Amino acid sequence: MLSIIVSTVYPERLERFRRNVAETIGDIPYEIIAIENVKNPRSLANVYNEGGSRARFPYLLFMHEDAGFITRNWFEDIRRKLDEPDCGTVGFAGSKLMFNMPGGWGMGLKWMYVNVLQCGEVARANYDANTPFVEVVTIDGLAMFVRKEVWAENPFDEESLPGFHCYDVDFSLNLSLKYRNYVCFCVDVYHDSAGNFDRVWLDQTLKIYEKKWKHILPRAVDNIHLTPSQIKYEEERQCFRFLKILEKDSVLRNFYKRRFMNYPLTLRHFEHLVKLVLGLAQKRR
């Protein structure tokens, strides 16, 4: 029924993950394909593709070993969603829209849909208990369900993704060109990591954006309708947000700085410029 693929680094986390699945999945056939990734580290794209090729069952789950399930018998509803012919990947955090700029799977709370217990705290965004699944464009990589046939048509891009970052955005973006991706609200999960947005992530994100993503962005689900001026407005906000948090000498910050300076000088844009200048002045003190 379900093949669960995990890239494992810590034996104790893997053992906890195995116990969690056994206690919560219910009475269905499953296998856990745990691929050790310590001695000769490989990219997640490479590990996940190996796991997918070894899978015996028609449904796949790519999941982090530091995550797990709270809800019991969790695969029943997800399997029914996966069986819809136009279903791509199903996860627990995602975004309805991705602007034409480099970044992670989420570009602002307005567009994010999240149902995760993150590091012991409930992390929900636009959550609706009465809506089992909500369509999104991008999916966070903590857990990604997909039919094996869909993955086989659209494997992870090993050539463009040599590390541990961006595989989830790239995979779900590619699927969104042909299928519909979903965030699941009817199953609760936990994740004991907040992610690692280091310099490697920044560099990899810009490279994959320049190579692939900018040619298909912006992308949004069918019920999001923005005019060109609204898209510009939102993209300017995203530039401002990233400029506030990125390190001064990062290549991604330089990209956003150039993009930010090219926006029309509206009152709001001027206010953002002033805030950035004041923020830099305070940091230098």
Image (tube, grey):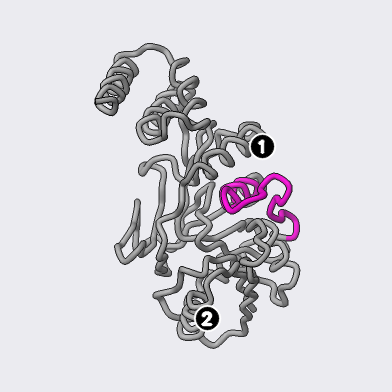
Nearer the viewer's eye, disc 1 or disc 2? 2
* Residue type at numbered disc 2: Arg
Q: Position of residue 138 (x, y in %)?
A: 53, 48
User: Would you identify the image quadrant in which residue 82 lies?
Assistant: bottom right
Which is nearer the eye, 177 or 239? Answer: 239
Q: Is residue 152 left or right of residue 104?
A: right
Residue 212 numbered tag = 1
Q: Name the outermost residue toward the front.
A: 285
Residue at x 41%, y 47% (from the top left corner): 112
Q: Quadrant of the C terminus?
A: top left
Question: Helix, strand or loop at disc 1?
Answer: loop
Q: Is residue 163 left or right of residue 228?
A: right
Instruction: Provide the residue span drawn in magenta.
Output: 152-175
Q: Position of residue 136 (x, y in %)?
A: 50, 49
Which is nearer the eye, 220 or 30? Answer: 30
Q: Position of residue 233 (x, y in %)?
A: 40, 24
Q: Name the outermost residue toward the top.
A: 265
Residue at x 41%, y 76% (from the top left corner): 71
Which is nearer the eye, 35 or 230? Answer: 35
Q: Position of residue 108 (x, y in %)?
A: 39, 40
153 part of magenta stretch: yes
Residue 18 numbered tag = 2
Q: Residues within 10 Å of mark 2 (few under 14, many from 20)?
A: some
Of the two numbered discs 1 and 2 on the same chain, state the one appearing first in sequence.
2
Which is nearer the eye, 16 or 124? Answer: 16
Q: Quadrant of the N terminus?
A: bottom right
* Residue type at numbered disc 1: Lys
Residue at x 35%, y 63% (from the top left corner): 119
Question: Helix, strand or loop at disc 2?
Answer: helix
- Is 55 rendered above or below residue 87? below
